[in-house]
Amino acid sequence: MNQQTCRNQTGTPKGRTRRTVPMTTTLYEALKRMTVVRDGLVVRSLDGSAKTDSETRRAIERICRRAGLPIRQWHTLRHTFGTHAALFGVNPWRLQTWLGHKRIDETMLYVHVAEAHAREWPGEIHEAARREIDPDKRVIVMLGARSRASHTQAESASSIESGATTAA
């Protein structure tokens, strides 16, 4: 199915091509645990019907709040995925395919941002990269390790803050 729904209108995606983005193992396992098999859209109402644009927007806002994260929208997640994949060294041609870009210069924007903001990776990400030899899978494993590393860093910062509070 080569369709998208935007503003309650269903039609072809902007680039006229289906975009297939690989999943981290964590996401795959979470989707497998769902009690209802869902074909097509993942974000649905409890009765299985598709959510409206505003309902999906509220759903992502609720997810962000519960996770203690800044509120971001769906398209921001797409840009974040592209930028982090570029940071972790995915081949630009592969990234172009994942993002569904028609022209490589669109994809190179992500590569240039990644180059401009390069920084040291946490140990968890280095370890994940060492365990996977397939370059495409390595990037996905690194993306999954990134979320675990962020969670660990947040827990460390929280314990430092609570320790400083009790010491005062």
Image (spheres, rainbow, N blue to C red):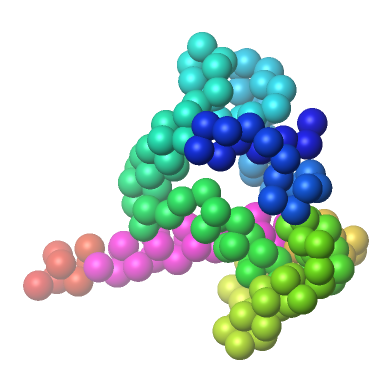
Q: Position of residue 47 (x, y in %)?
A: 51, 12
Q: Position of residue 82 (x, y in %)?
A: 67, 64
Q: Position of residue 135 (x, y in %)?
A: 87, 65
* Side of 43 relative to 68 (left or right): right
Residue 2 lies, with reference to residue 72, above or below; the image says: above
Name which residue lies at 31% across and 62% down.
158
Instruction: Give whichever of 136, 79 is nearer the camera.
Output: 79
Inspect this view and state whether residue 7 appears: yes
Instruction: Give whichever of 71, 118 is nearer the camera.
Output: 71
Residue 132 lies, with reference to residue 57, above or below; the image says: below
- Magenta span main SS: helix
Q: Is residue 138 magenta?
A: no
Inspect this view and state whether residue 88 appears: no
Pick out the residue farthest to the right. 134
* Side of 36 relative to 130 (left or right): left
Name which residue lies at 63% across and 25% down.
33
* Side of 56 relative to 84 (left or right): left
Name which residue lies at 63% across and 32% down.
10
Residue 34 lies, with reference to residue 21, above or below; the image says: above
Quarter assignment of residue 60:
top left
| Range drawn in magenta | 140-161
Quarter containing the N terminus? top right
Q: Is residue 146 magenta?
A: yes
Instruction: Give whichever of 55, 157 is nearer the camera.
Output: 55
Name which residue lies at 9% across and 72% down.
168
